[in-house]
Amino acid sequence: MEPTRDCPLFGGAFSAILPTGAIDVSDLRPVPDNQEVFCHPVTDQSLTVELLELQAHVQGEAAARYHFEDVGGVQGARAVHVESVQPLSLENLSLRGCCQEAWVLSGKQQVAKENQQVAKEVTLHQALLRLPQYQTDLLLTFSQPP
């Protein structure tokens, strides 16, 4: 197993345990203030942690699908396919006291990298934690390239 490190997020508001070799993408290119993005130098896997405005107009499983499709739209995905959506047990979360509901979604998106014409199928695993008292949807996206 790869060694890990505690990595502060959003100025230390909370933290994540990441592999020691994880690269902070903001050291390579601009990253929006509402995101923390990390990539693995060998596997090309990435993890994005996003603080988003609460989408109160969608509830339950539909909220997880909404954010998955939104990520696909932002990335210019040519196709999106949801494979599964399941509720995440709140009692296993550190944020259980303020998380109203949580979902885990797995799916695939066909995405072309920056200057490439050919789209590759990428597997995404997303966790959505809904924090209505903060008007926030916390979205974690793990990207697993082919």
Image (spheres, rainbow, N blue to C red):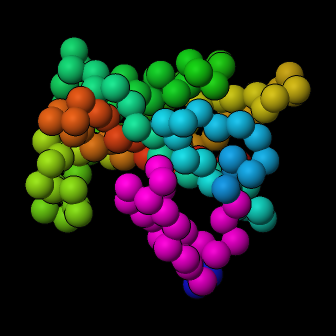
> In the image, is residue 64 above or below residue 46?
above
Magenta region includes residue 7? yes
Whole-percent x, y for residue 80 in the image = 53, 25
The boundaries of the magenta stretch are: 3-23
Q: Nearer the viewer, residue 102 or 120?
A: 102
- At 35% from the left and 41% from the top, the residue drawn is 138
Q: Nearer the viewer, residue 96 or 106?
A: 96
Q: Nearer the viewer, residue 87 or 26?
A: 26
Name the image quarter holding residue 45. bottom right
Side (left or right) of 126 relative to 24? left
Whole-percent x, y for residue 19 in the image = 60, 72
Is there any visible trace of residue 132 in the rendered image?
Answer: yes
- At 66% from the left and 65% from the top, the residue drawn is 22
- Is the N terminus in the top left, top right, bottom left or bottom right quadrant? bottom right
Q: Nearer the viewer, residue 14 or 43?
A: 14
> In the image, is residue 11 above or below residue 6?
above
Is there any visible trace of residue 141 in the rendered image?
Answer: no
Q: Main secondary structure of the magenta part?
A: strand
| Total count of labels | 0
Whole-percent x, y for residue 94 in the image = 23, 63
> In the image, is residue 77 above or below residue 42?
above
Magenta region includes residue 91? no
Whole-percent x, y for residue 130 in the image = 23, 38
